[in-house]
Amino acid sequence: MTSAPAAARVKRAGKKRAKAQPKAAQAKVVQVASRRPAASPDIEVGRRVLMMEANGLAALAAELDGDFSKALDILMNVSRAGSHFRVIVSGMGKSGHVARKIAATMASTGTPAFFVHPAEASHGDLGMVTNGDVLLCLSNSGDVPEMADLIAHAKRFAIPLIGMTSKAKSALGQASDVVLLLPQVEEACPMGLAPTTSTTLMLALGDALAVGLMERKGFTRDHYRVFHPGGRLGKQLIKVKDLMHTGAEMPLVVSGTGMREALVTMAGRSFGSIGVVGKSGRDKDRLIGIITDGDLRRHIEGDLLSQKVDAVMTRKPITITEDLLAVEALREMNSRRITAFFVVKAGRPAGILHMHDCVRAGIT
């Protein structure tokens, strides 16, 4: 159990660090705290830590300069067309854990990247770093002995080195081609020792680099889906064209077809609907109507089998495009209480998507 004098020292240390923050950031702390009711000591500690790290992020954003753009310029070489190079991210201790996450984020957003442990690099893994690669090293102090061989290797083979550190005059800072300088901020740890605020800044700056590369390259949902085929994210990015039925699978008849023949076609496809395409003129091969179970019920009392499809069909049906996300198509089906959509391209049927197709793909 912490003694009363020790608790008082920790409390005073917390106040001292809060005062060390920029005035603008400190004002934000007071403003947020003033809107909240009194809380337990545990919650106050949590709020203090979160606000210290938030203030650190605000300082980092304010101090971001042209070196960030220079780093993106270097990293973009890895992603140029036909390139087989990678971003090698490295760090020791807690910085190493952050480096792994940065490498994973870059790799999943279109920038080939992987993590190399600096200590393992000295025992053979330097062979994973080749000419044309880019080295991104993380160290708050910038003076990590285990990173010395990795830095020397980069300088020896003219491998571009980007350093993320809070000490510009450290070994890492002086060796780097571009330094992403972290602001001098207090760690949220009450002893000021455990990497807390500093690792949060590294993580956020790594995200900023990854997103900056995404925007420069025009990274789209389609690109994202290539790297995320599994899991919920992958399913949410499946498009209609990936699931729709095409060609002879589509239940289609031409204008003027008798209902007897149309019903045979409708029953043979099991979509619960049939499309009607134009026979000649401007409407030739264009989708001009659909017949659903509802249309059949509305005409059941008459001599349905003796009629033509034109007399039964619903004209100007609601359709979708092949590039629509399947999850959005399913949402429309549920909203309109229908089970299938025809997919059209330039007015002509290109496919049909049934609700069951979405369910089988795991889309809900």
Image (cartoon, rainbow, N blue to C red):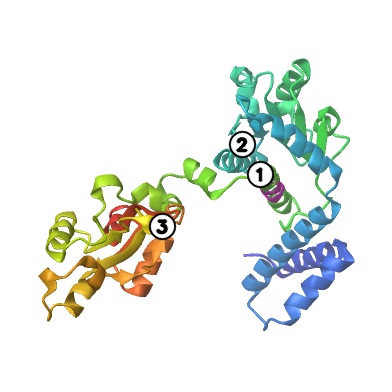
Note whether 211 is above or below 258 in the view shown.
above
Q: Residue furthest front?
A: 281
For label 1, the residue is: 210
Majority SS type along the magenta span: helix
Residue type (three-letter) at the residue carrying disc 1? Ala
- Residue designated by label 3: 282
Task: State which region is magenta.
Answer: 202-208
Report the Cα–Cα distance between label 2 and label 3: 48 Å
Secondary-structure class at tag 2: loop
Residue 322 x/y as whole percent: 42, 52
x then y, percent, for residue 149: 72, 21
Q: Position of residue 61 (x, y in %)?
A: 80, 55
Helix or strand or loop: what does disc 3 sit on? Answer: helix
Is 160 situated left or right of 219 in this image?
right
- The reply to whether dot 2 and dot 1 touch (C-beta < 8 Å) is yes
Residue 247 occupies quadrant:
top left
- 292 in relation to 250, above or below: below
Q: Earlier in the sequence, mark 2 or mark 3?
A: 2
